[in-house]
Amino acid sequence: MKFDQEGNVTTFEKKKTELCQELSLQARDLRFQHSTSLTARNNCIIIRMASLKAILTPQSLMVLDFRGLGLERWLVLELAPQLASQTNSLPFEFRALEAILQHKVNTLQVQLNDVEPVILDTLESLVDPKILSADRSKLHVLLQNSKSLSELETDIKVFKDSLLKILDEDEIIEELCLTKWTDPRVFEESSLGIDQAEEMELLLENYYMQAEEMGNKARELKELIDDSENVIFINLDSHRNVMMRLNLQLTMGTFSLSLFGLIGVAFGMNLTTAFEDDPRAFWLVTGFMFLGSGLIWRRLLSFLGRHLQPSVPPLVIQTHTHIHSLPCSFWFEKFQRADGTGRFPGGPLPQ
């Protein structure tokens, strides 16, 4: 698909060799090896923005291999009107490059806006301290969105690095101003101080700053996920400790009952004693068993509580006293006793 300076759209089919001959490019220039790149070659700008492949010349913009990538709507409804707009006096390559960069930034922003609310809602439900166990389905959702966020963060970083590489080289910025080298009038204006390289630099810096903001937001989300994972683990450990403590208490109670249950075992043996004939013996032995079991259980709980309580850090006694922490009246009385006056030697009383 080819766009001219008025925004008119035409479609064409050419072999790569024919296109290279027409634009005086090398075959390696159209390999599009990097996922995001802006390269100036022989008064052309070779653009690769994810799935978008384009060649920009001072007179036209050619979009290559666009079918099946979901770009048709943007190319026809948005890109063409932007290229036809004459609201500013900048050359054609400025309008085309700005439209492509804006499309890339909008795509990244849409992906970030789709991932951010899902991650925040999932984290809010997972870090609730009332939840005894983490929902596996929500953890799966968080894992999927975390992977998407990592991929998005990588795309933003690659986009930023490609712009930063251009901004660090003034020669590359000069090469991106295609009209400057083909239009004598523009070249003459640049020699008089009206240089388009500054406009190109401002254009690239604008989208670099937008990418920087998105990168910071994606980084904050990653840090929030990491912090929330720590909170989830702390909550799970806390509930696990409660269950272990309850299990230990039940074990101690069972041990106490079993210990005094031996008395009942002794009475269950085939032995005859006069104590069994007493009608109060059953209640006396039973009460003694429960009372003894309760006392042992309480002693075990007390022992458990003393050993599970967190240790209190020792108090640090400060032995060195700074001069400035003492009141002024102390120094006044000290020197008054020394020389009989209320003045410091060589100066007034400090405040």
Image (cartoon, helix red, strand yellow):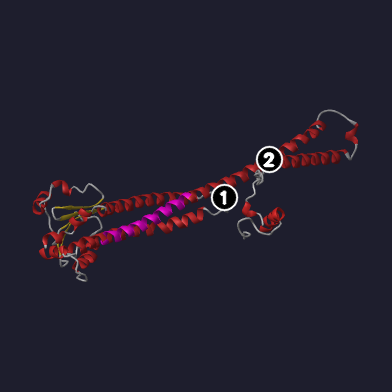
Q: CA distance from mark 1 to mark 2?
A: 25 Å
- Residue at the spot x=28%, y=58% of the render? 104
Q: Between residue 318 and residue 178, name the one nearer to us.
A: 318
Q: Which residue is mark 1?
A: 132
Decide: is 57 above or below 282: below
Asked whether 44 falls inside the magenta stretch, the response is: no
Q: Is residue 346 left or right of residue 171?
A: right
The answer to which image quadrant residue 340 occupies is bottom right
Question: How crowded is the residue under tag 1: few (<14 C-alpha within 10 Å), some, or many (20+)?
Answer: few
Q: Between residue 193 and residue 153, name the one nearer to us.
A: 193
Quadrant location of the N terminus in the rendered image? bottom left
Image coordinates of residue 276 in percent, x first then y, are 88, 34
Segment colored magenta:
202-226
Secondary structure under tag 1 reads: loop
Secondary structure under tag 2 reads: helix
* Most distant residue in the bottom direction: 87
Q: Is residue 292 left or right of residue 145?
A: right
Image coordinates of residue 17 in percent, x first then y, are 10, 49
- Number of labels in the image equals 2
Image coordinates of residue 15 in percent, x first then y, are 11, 50
* Most distant residue in the top direction: 271
Q: Most prominent secondary structure in the magenta stretch?
A: helix
Q: Does the rendering let one see residue 297? A: yes
- Residue at the spot x=52%, y=50% of the render? 231
Q: Is residue 210 left or right of residue 123?
A: left
Q: Residue flagged by tag 1: what amino acid is it?
A: Leu
Q: Which residue is mark 2?
A: 307
Give whichever of discs 1 and 2 has the lower sequence position.
1
Q: Residue flagged by tag 2: what amino acid is it?
A: His
Q: Between residue 343 and residue 38, name the one nearer to us.
A: 343
Q: Between residue 72 and residue 261, name the one nearer to us.
A: 72
Asked whether 204 falls inside the magenta stretch, the response is: yes
